[in-house]
Amino acid sequence: MKTNLSQKQIGQRISELRKTRGFTQEELANRLEISRSSLAQIELGNRNVDILELQKLSMILKFSLDDFMSKNFSAIKNIDVKEKKEEKKSGERISVPKLQVNKFKNILLYILERCAGKPNVGETVLYKLLYFSDFNYYELYEEHLTGAKYRKLPYGPVPQKLDAIINQMLEKGQLQKVKTEYHGYPQTRYLPLVKADLTKLKASEKEVIDGVIEQMSDWSATMISEYSHKDLPWEVTEEGDYISYELAFYRELPYSVRIYEDEND
């Protein structure tokens, strides 16, 4: 089948159709009888789709190959209103992060309570602890922990609106900002002046945060930045763009924190 579409365009269309139809990456890969990582590469435009796979996709996702290859293709047009309503009722996961400010503040305070005494935990390490807490939780439970959005910046993922939240906490006397040096480099640290309200956290949320702290809180800013740069969600995102939580399901070890049932099929 000849097409003027690039591999990336084909991958984007498959991704849009999958999400519109309410499939997770794991579910669709299962139906296609390929690995989750192979599907990830297809959707990212890094792997070609042969005609047999495309035909199978058209049957599973219920789209016309002619429409799929047309210039005016739209995943939304390929699903009727009734089906969309049914999917919403079924409670399919849709990644629309919405920042929960009070929860974010409590998680920030909790991380600082446990880590503020460590001389390596400046802003860079703190940002990465928040990022891995958020993305690990989303991969495990398909729910947002804080709802924070993270942007891809040169030194790794950075939570947006963090400056405004920290300024609020400084004004309310909840945090203290300290300018210092660590191994000859300038460092900004935050000290908690009030305790986190742990009643605002579920046991599963605290467990994920604790796991991240135990794994990474002793790492240097350089080490944790380099580690975050190899996490697939950060790696495949364009610099300056927001990092999609959906990309957490494309992770491989050692970054993936979820055991997928079809992993060894």
Image (spheres, rainbow, N blue to C red):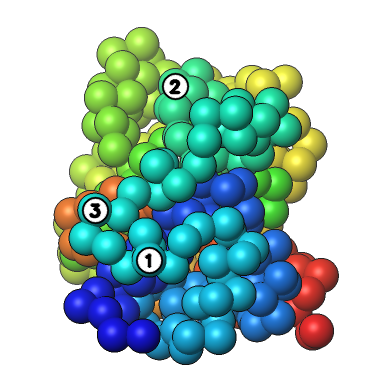
Comparing marks 1 and 3, which lies closer to the viewer? 1
Q: Is residue 199 left or right of residue 18?
A: right
In the image, residue 141 sits, relative to residue 102, either above or below, namely: below
Q: Position of residue 30 (x, y in %)?
A: 72, 72
Judging by the rendered image, the residue that carries numbered circle 3 is 72
In the image: residue 258, left or right of residue 5: right
The disc labelled 3 sits on which kind of residue? Asn
Instruction: Name the residue tied to disc 2.
Output: 101
For the point 63% across and 54% down, the residue is 23
Amino acid of disc 2 = Val
The reply to whether callout 1 and callout 2 are in contact (CB within 8 Å) is no
Q: How far apart, in angstroms, are the residues tagged by discs 3 and 2?
A: 40 Å
- Where residue 41 sits in the image (x, y, percent)? 45, 79
Q: CA distance from mark 1 to mark 2?
A: 46 Å
* Residue at which label 1 appears: 66
Name the one closer to the observer, 233 or 191: 233
Q: Residues within 10 Å of mark 1 (few under 14, many from 20)?
A: few
**Label 2: few (<14), some (14–19) or many (≥20) C-alpha neighbours in 10 Å:** some
- The vertical placement of 29 against 265, above or below, is above
Disc 1 marks a residue whose amino acid type is Asp
